[in-house]
Amino acid sequence: MAEALTDSLYFLPLGGSDEIGMNLNLYGYGPEDDQKWIIVDCGVTFGDLSTPGVDIIMPDPAFIEERRDDLIGMVLTHAHEDHMGAVAHLWRRLKCPIWATPFTAWLVRDRLREFGLEDEVELHEIALDSRFDLGPFDIQLITLTHSIPEPNGLAIRTPAGLVLHTGDWKIDPDPLIGETTDVSALTALGEEGVLAMVCDSTNVFSPGESGSEAGVKEELIKVVGENTTGKVAIAAFASNVARLQSAIEAAEANGRRVCLVGRSMHRMTAAAKSVGLLSHVQDFVGEEEAGFFPPEKILYLCTGSQGEPRAALSRIAEGNHRNVTLGTGDTVIFSSRVIPGNDIGIFQLQNRLAERGVEIITEKNRPIHVSGHPCRDELAQMYQWAQPKVAIPVHGERRHLIEHAAFARQLQVPHAVTVRNGDMVELRADGGASIVDEAAAGRLHLDGNFVTDANALSMRERRKLAYAGQVTVAMAVHGKKGELVSGPDVRSMGVAEDRSFSLDEFLDALADEAERAFDRLSNRDRRDVETAEEEVRRAVRREANRIWGKKPWVEVIILEV
């Protein structure tokens, strides 16, 4: 840290600002010699083409890990993966107690069990209207609506002031499950005096309102009813339990039984039933049993709406799912939005389904999805209720945060601060706010079973390999004379071929250049293995670039004999 922290309230995002997903937020309060911290949310994002071999990406908690003795707890606003998916991966670094409402706690406990942590973690299951103290922080849960059960905002009170941390939210007058937004609690906070509101920015560019889940249910009933002869599959986010209930009601209204397909569907419905949701639906049909139902009597509720390669719907589209097949006369309903970055995978999935003769219905041609995040009219309403002195937009890319800050100023909010991950914001009792310092805010990659830094050598090497492949040059050299005894033997992986210049010709050219480079070395350098390997490596890489126009990863191995 460049500056000493004083007895003030601080907000520090380590994930979720300048991006959508991977939320990890810190609040700190107290004098420098006795400062206490809490974490709000601990989520993940997902790998893409820029992170080959990496499925899950997490915020690096190094800042708070170094202050673990002053970390007094973690509070989770809701159970989406981008808000709680990193808990089990990072808990051994943090080793703090966790507070969560029943639905979220069930899913956290289930994940901790997978990691063998269930008996180690102090997990407090709290009611939706809880208010409790964590050191100098007085925390009150505020019921909101979102696309998952039990979403909560947090009213965080300290002697320096009150912060409203919204988490993810929308205003849904008929969310189907759970309570509606607690307007009286929000207006009471506004009357009490909100120093700052840390608020969701996802849909700041979208005018109007996000829409109600009740309307989606009505449309799903209609759409399912239009297919009277074939099988129907609905792809949705498993965490959107209200959407699952809408899909189930659409099936039952049209005389169909529901079959869950995909591990996440089973996990989320189990979590929902544990807190009394989905209690009045018919029992689900197993995958093997579903195959004996007439096509018009079954509805598959599937994971894989984002085109995930290993998810259920992708395996169905490839024709290699062990129990479920879809073809001509069947319908797949994508009751979800296209998350930016997943476009290609989703369209490839839909094309594979279309090739099988499946009819595809999406939100583009029927109103079968609504967002779980606030549009501009809902943001304006929240600011009217809370009346904060400071707006701190989060949960958005840079353009979202800038637009949200400008919108807050239009709504007469006195101050707005646009933060990046790692920005330390001081919140002052007089209503002032400013970025006073910067903390490390990197990323961690879950690479197989290992958690590694995003900038680790292994990840840099893998990106290079993904771009231009690898060339390996093996040579045997007489240790005393420095003479080439065997080779160069050149092998490659991921190197392109051309009709006019075959791969064998390319490798032969590299072998010739490797030998020439070795011959150019002095006798002394030939006997210095490290020097010789480096000179040959550079020469081979230059020659590969001259021929191919790319610089592959080149490894040279010289064996002394």
Image: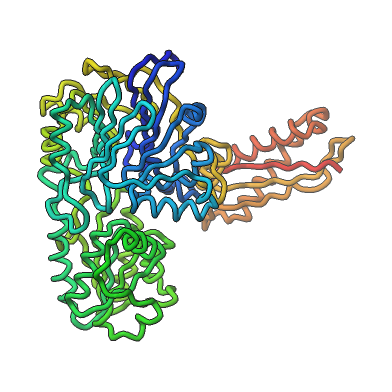
Tell me: 474 left or right of 78: right
* Residue drawn at 15 percent across, 30 percent down: 190
In the picture, the quarter occupied by the C terminus is top right
Vertical relation: 234 (above or below) 46 = below
Tell me: 24 left or right of 449: left
Name the residue furthest right: 480
Vertical relation: 542 (above or below) 435 = below
Q: Is residue 505 visible?
A: yes
From the top left corner, tell me how far across and down residue 400 is, in percent. 24, 35
- The image quarter in which residue 395 lies: top left
Q: Nearer the viewer, residue 500 or 381?
A: 381
From the top left corner, tell me how far across and down residue 410 is, in percent. 11, 27
The count of marks equals 0
- The image quarter in which residue 230 lies: bottom left
Q: Nearer the viewer, residue 357 or 9?
A: 9
Vertical relation: 281 (above or below) 504 = below
* Residue drawn at 80 percent across, 43 percent down: 559
Tell me: 224 left or right of 481: left
Q: Nearer the viewer, residue 168 or 523?
A: 168
